[in-house]
Amino acid sequence: MGAGKSIVGERVAEAIARPFVDLDRLIERRHGPIPKLFERGEHEFRRIEEGILAEALAGPESVIALGGGAVLSPLNRERLRARAFTVYLDVGVETAWERVRGSDRPLAQREADFRKLYESRQDVYAAAADAVAQDADDVLLASLGLRFGGALSPRAPVVIADARVLELHPAPVEAPVHTLPRGEAAKSLAIVERLWRELTIGREGTIVAFGGGSTTDVAGFVAATYLRGVPWIAVPTTLTGQVDAAIGGKTGINTAEGKNLAGAFHFPESVVIDPDLLATLPEKDRRGGLAEVVKTGLLSGRAVWELPEAEMIRACAAHKAGVVLSDPYETEGRRARLNLGHTFAHALEAGSGYRVAHGEAVALGLLAALRLSGQPTDAVEEILRPEPVEADLDTAWAALKRDKKGEGVFVLLEAPGKPVVTTVPDAEARAALVSLVRQ
Ligand SMILES: NC(=O)c1ccc[n+]([C@@H]2O[C@H](COP(=O)([O-])OP(=O)(O)OC[C@H]3O[C@@H](n4cnc5c(N)ncnc54)[C@H](O)[C@@H]3O)[C@@H](O)[C@H]2O)c1
Ligand SMILES: [Zn+2]
């Protein structure tokens, strides 16, 4: 009661594009006002609540706000365990009481009783919940297994780590370590084969990936394929990894024909994010990550880049978690919006023979996307300061046309926070590309 579950529930539902069901509202619509129902006895109310929760759980995937007493029923708890990811929204008794005092809620008439009720329910809530949250971002993060801090205790772990990262930081868990060449060089079939040969864990073993996006991509792919799939945990050590690459279950390697051409969806059991690991990150890698941060800010309509670093990372990670949960396997077109600026970026990377770094290319890609959208470019220009790069125009144009998002289809912005997937005439797209290349 008073935790804000209707507001948080609605926000989560919107972020993951699923319907929102407020159980109490649904009960009232069918059976009349809850205070009136309580007059017939709490037992009768709980019986009705059990029936309606069972119905909601059997319906299409949705976000359900439960009344504060719903988890008192063992039957409800059992059904939740079987069908739902359950989050305890805990704002503390003070805040909760401030919000409900003076309302007509039958169980919130006297402060002393309310406090006693809150206390008495803590154990049941803790037992029923898969996670505890304070706000909508917490719910999104927890739903995808993303967490900030906390101990790491996987079963039978083995660590796959970037060589440079290991020089700078202790491995996140005590276990045998397999070291990868630093950065992108690790994303090769030769490295995957080496790991397939070297690994000795069984199906119950867990791979812990410790490094940037290159490490989580390749270690995640090894986890997807070794013994037809073993669990894995991502511990990203770059800004790009913490706001983007380690989130969303896409794993893979490069082939001679291009980047990320072999891979699999294989969601990590958890992603453990520690912004302190970024203290050693070289400036150019930080700037690369910042391009994805600005992208996220444009997509979410929130100036996330103005937040202190740890909060900025949390906001970006939660945004990506929401989009991923709305379309986990990229079958509904919703994940495509994360490619804002990326069609141009990939073209510039290809056109420069991959000499232009991804982040630099994304900064330019965002500029082009904003120009084509008729949206202000000041945030991108002030924070990322993109400059035209050297690239072969014809190669870049061919790459753009070939881009896997389909011919002429781009992610643009109707307004900050309102991405649209739309077509752009060739002439306009080409002119936008030309403006990104040094003449
Ligand atoms: N799977 C996805 O959804 C997804 C999304 C975005 C990007 N990616 C992939 O991620 C890769 C890029 O990842 P990245 O930008 O994180 O870089 P990276 O993993 O290639 O690492 C870049 C450099 O930073 C070093 N490094 C890493 N952590 C460090 C630290 N804490 N301190 C000092 N040095 C550190 C590495 O040794 C390396 O030299 C690309 O291959 C890209 O395709 C994947
Ligand atoms: Zn990117």
Image: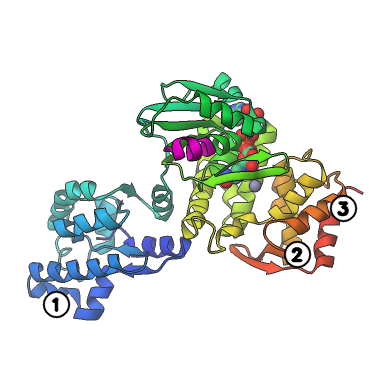
Crowding around mark 1 (Cα neighbors within 10 Å: few <14, some 14 to 19, many 20+) is: few
Residue at (55%, 62%) from the top-left corner? 334
Q: Which residue does the numbered mark 2 point to in the structure image? A: 372
Asked if the beta carbon under badge 3 is closer than 8 A to the nearest atom of ligand 2, the reply is no
Q: Amino acid at mark 3?
A: Asp
Residue at (63%, 30%) from the top-left corner? 190
Determine which of the numbered discs, if any, sits on residue 310 in the image. Answer: none
Q: Earlier in the sequence, mark 1 or mark 3?
A: 1
Q: Earlier in the sequence, mark 1 or mark 2?
A: 1
Q: Position of residue 184 (x, y in %)?
A: 66, 33
Determine which of the numbered discs, if any, sits on residue 36 in the image. Answer: 1
Q: Position of residue 434 (x, y in %)?
A: 86, 56
Q: Amino acid at mark 2?
A: Leu
Vertical comparison of 313 with 380: above or below: above
Residue sitting nearer the eye, 113 or 171: 171
Residue 202 as seen in the image, left or right of residue 438: left
Q: Which residue does the numbered mark 3 point to in the structure image? A: 394
**Quarter placement of the N terminus:** bottom left
Q: Are marks 1 and 2 in contact (CB under 8 Å)?
A: no
Q: Amino acid at mark 1?
A: Lys
Q: Position of residue 223 (x, y in %)?
A: 48, 37
Instruction: Choose top left, top right, bottom left or bottom right for residue 232.
Output: top left
CA separation in Å, label 1 and label 3:
72 Å
Instruction: Say if the magenta span includes residue 60.
Output: no
Q: Earlier in the sequence, mark 2 or mark 3?
A: 2
Q: Please state the extent of the stretch shown in magenta in the rendering.
A: 220-231
CA separation in Å, label 1 and label 2:
57 Å
Residue 315 as seen in the image, left or right of residue 288: left
Asked if the beta carbon under badge 2 is closer than 8 A to the nearest atom of ligand 2, the reply is no
